[in-house]
Amino acid sequence: MGKGVPVLIVAPLIGHLTSSLEMAKIMLERNKQLSVTSLIMKIPTDPEGTTKIRSLLAGYNNVERLNFHHLPTPEDTSSLWSATNRAGSLDQLIEYQKTQVRDIVSRIKGLNAFILDSITTTMIDVADEFGMPSYIFFTSGAAFLGVMLHFQALEDEGTTEMCDIFKKTKEIVSPSFANPIPISVLPSLVTNKETWSTGIIEYIRGYRKAKGIMVNSFCELETLAFNSFSMDLDYGKSRRLPPISLVGPIINKSQNETKNQSEIMEWLDGQPANSVVFLCFGSVGSFHSDQVKKIANGLEKCGYRFLWSLRHPPTEKEGFSGEYENQEHLLPKGFLDRTASIGKVVGWIPQFAVLSHSAVGGFVSHCGWNSTLESIWCGVPIATWPLFAEQQLNAFQLVKELGISVEISLDYNESNENQRTVSAEKVERAIRELMDGENVVRKKVKEISEKSKQAVKEGGSSYITFDNIIQSISSDSGNLHLVS
């Protein structure tokens, strides 16, 4: 196999970094001639997120030939982080870092490729300056990728903007989905005109410029979506597609321990098999106090054992969620005392370790893609409660397309100012359905779980396609142009 030093540039989002670094680790295990240099960004207004990133990186310190270079945090955060939405702010941060990236990569000996995530594709401009090929690691699913590519092609070829089309219909068709997609489950990143036209569509145009796209999914899960890419014929820039490889599920199974991990695992050890419903909504997921009380009431009414990761909402509009110092004041009076024998309310949690525990029988989730793949791997069915990004579309796919999840909501969106709270009764009903041992969803999840493990074994579908793209990256020599 060829030698080389690809540079990995990922947005400073813990979900993106988690799967991207694991992907790099596997790549290095498969090809001993490669080295990877990962350039690490941080969000200046998210100190807790920065702490999580440092903790994540610590778990990779002993990975041979994986090197980290920390990009400087901008001094003037007020001007950089002043956009009206997080996506716009990320765009500004990535643009700011281009100068730093140029300087660093100009000094990397053996540089032969750029590997970018789904948000940093504007760095392709920098790769082109150095004569380097770019690869995309798409950290979400193939069906979502298909939707994004389809919408971008329609807009670039048509005379009407997609945002105008969304206003005139209740559902839309995409080749990567069998069913028409309700507009209500499309990401606001797409339906919001400003976000779409000034940022997201540029990301997607970047996908088409890449030499290859790796998707953190597997063919046995997303057969229709994968096959739909061959329908996107190459007859112009708007529909040009590089090879797309499904290389997952790529999961960080050795997540760093949290301060409360031993206590949580000891509690789970004392619970019967498949008896606990686990509620967790990601690193930035949170609810306002009224919704928290309804979740608590639903849990108490259904009577199942539960483990609940509860985090407080951002204290300012563009802030980030965090840990409660005291959760009791947010919950219904006496809730913790009444449920002490069956439940546990905690903060940040070792999610994969919990999902892997035999006591956990159901997962109430925001449907982030990493969480989705983890639940599938562990054979734990999901009750869908999306909050932001592409999670609503993931929830629709899990419930309506794949039939491997129970619905609490498909279109709950925390950015919707008129978002109604989900009732305690609905939470109770969904958990009862989720935890029903005879539910057909549970059987389907167990079947697809086994397929997910076969896909990444030697000879499996993802193993083979990942080997092919590793070979492609290691064979690249680029045409290095030094930037003056």
Image (cartoon, rainbow, N blue to C red):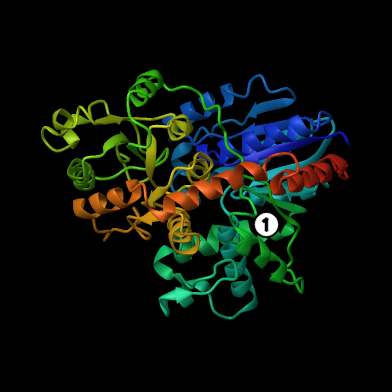
- Mark 1 Cα-neighbour bin, 10 Å: few <14, some 14–19, many ≥20: many
For residue 106, which quarter of the picture? top right
Q: x%, y% of residue 474?
A: 84, 39
Q: Quadrant of the C terminus?
A: top right
Identified by mark 1, the residue type is: Gly
Horizontal and vertical percent position of residue 233: 74, 72
Of residues 412 and 434, the one nearer the viewer is 434
Q: Residue at x 78, y 50 (%)?
A: 128
Q: Residue at x 67, y 57 (%)?
A: 206
Evaluate whether residue 13 shows in this view. Answer: no
Q: Tell me where residue 370 appears, x and y as whole percent.
A: 52, 43
- State the residue position of label 1: 206
- Please state which of residues 198 and 234 is positioned toward the viewer in this rendering: 234
Residue 201 figure quarter: bottom right
Residue for point 23% across, 48% down? 291
Secondary structure beneath disc 1? helix
**Is residue 431 visible in this depiction of the protein?**
yes
**Residue closer to the observer: 3 or 400:** 400
Relative placement, left or right, of 171 versus 114 is left
Left/right placement of residue 425 relative to residue 453 reads: left
Q: Position of residue 437 (x, y in %)?
A: 36, 46
